[in-house]
Image (cartoon, helix red, strand yellow):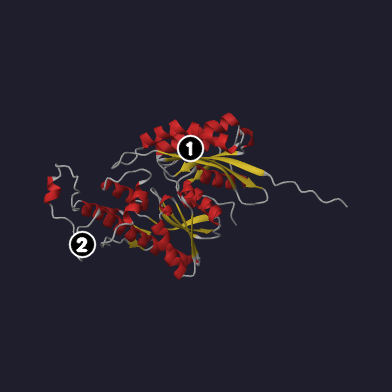
Amino acid sequence: MSPTSTSPPRRFIALGLEGSANKLGVGLIAHFSDNSPAQILSNLRDTFISPPGEGFLPKDTAKHHRAWIVPLIKRTLKESGVKVKDIDVICYTKGPGMGAPLQSVAVVARTLSKLWDKPIVGVNHCVGHIEMGREITGAQNPVVLYVSGGNTQVIAYAEQKYRIFGEALDIAVGNCLDRFARTLNIPNDPAPGYNIEQLAKSGKVLLELPYTVKGMDCSFSGILAYIDQLATQLAPSSDADSTTKSKQERKPLLDPATNNPITPADLCFSLQETVFGMLVEITERAMAHVGSSQVLIVGGVGCNERLQEMMGEMARERGGSVYATDERFCIDNGIMIAHAGLLAWRTGFETKFEDTTCTQRFRTDEVHVAWRD
């Protein structure tokens, strides 16, 4: 009797395009019919960086995306060795995000779909983060903390929906950190939140700041306004401009315990400790509600080591564990859009061409998660 020959599993490939904010990402991912782990074929990104003290405007960000998306796609195909004929589906970020950058990427996705005669799938940005986090970390059914410049949500899965248990009532936590970086004139390269994190590591004084948790929700606008006011009381630096006479005359902010001047590092440290404490509290409450012992942190702020450390301490006290990814997957990227889109496409979902629009508001709990039980 001759040995039975087994054919290799079929490979499905998706191209993902992400451009909801200032990160432009292009990725190629492969899934297999035997449900073995996904294979990352390419994951490229280019970031629009604005000058220190400034945010990124939609029109400037969209111009950056239009200039770089075609070169990134070409590089992705070249580096991965994937041919156009091998791609099964085009996936793009439908929302949420900034209107002009989203539109710039959606137009390219629509064009490639027609040019290459491929189906197209519009992907929810947050669901992309969640599914990529689950794939990379192996977390089975975690409570998800989604923290970025545009979103702050505590999420748990139930009945083919990602249910939002709590969220920011005003600005997102990442937006709070980014805007304070502007107040301090901290560079935006590589990212304002990252530079806040590094500065906070040398902070030694923990100032009392507004702590606003309302049930399962958080508010960050008040703490930002308060700490912005404190920043105006910092002692001027030695290279301060001579026009800052009014600042120099103002009484500097001092540590009440030592009478030493408060530094920008102290303010960054205090801000991080306070807002992350708020996030840990609502995440722990969600874990207790759903009976989960796992936390998955996704989104750009999820790269923050101090947030991971604080969440880890809480989870260990509950006998649980924390899952997080590095900057390749935490920060917005094309591979997460390709992955989530391919999961949906393999269930039979496809976005009708007339519906391949984008929207600045696209709730996480609006998505039918057909690929999960």
Q: Residue most toward the front?
A: 238
Q: Position of residue 228 (x, y in %)?
A: 24, 52
Residue flagged by tag 2: what amino acid is it?
Answer: Asp
Vertical position of residue 298 compared to residue 85: above or below: below
Q: Position of residue 46 (x, y in %)?
A: 44, 38
Does residue 332 show up? Answer: yes
* Count of marks placed on residues: 2
Q: Secondary structure at mark 2?
A: loop
Q: Position of residue 140 (x, y in %)?
A: 56, 60
The residue shown at (26%, 53%) is 264
Residue flagged by tag 1: what amino acid is it?
Answer: Thr
Task: Locate the C terminus by quadrant.
Answer: bottom right
Q: Residue most toward the top?
A: 115
Q: Nearer the viewer, residue 9 or 160?
A: 9
**Residue beneath label 2, please?**
255
**Residue beneath label 1, please?**
357
Q: Nearer the viewer, residue 90 or 263?
A: 263
The residue shown at (68%, 51%) is 34
Mark 1–mark 2 Cα distance, whole angstroms, equals 52 Å
Q: Position of residue 322 (x, y in %)?
A: 48, 61
Q: Earlier in the sequence, mark 1 or mark 2?
A: 2
Vertical position of residue 74 compared to residue 232: above or below: above
Q: Secondary structure at mark 1?
A: loop
Q: Nearer the viewer, residue 372 or 188?
A: 188
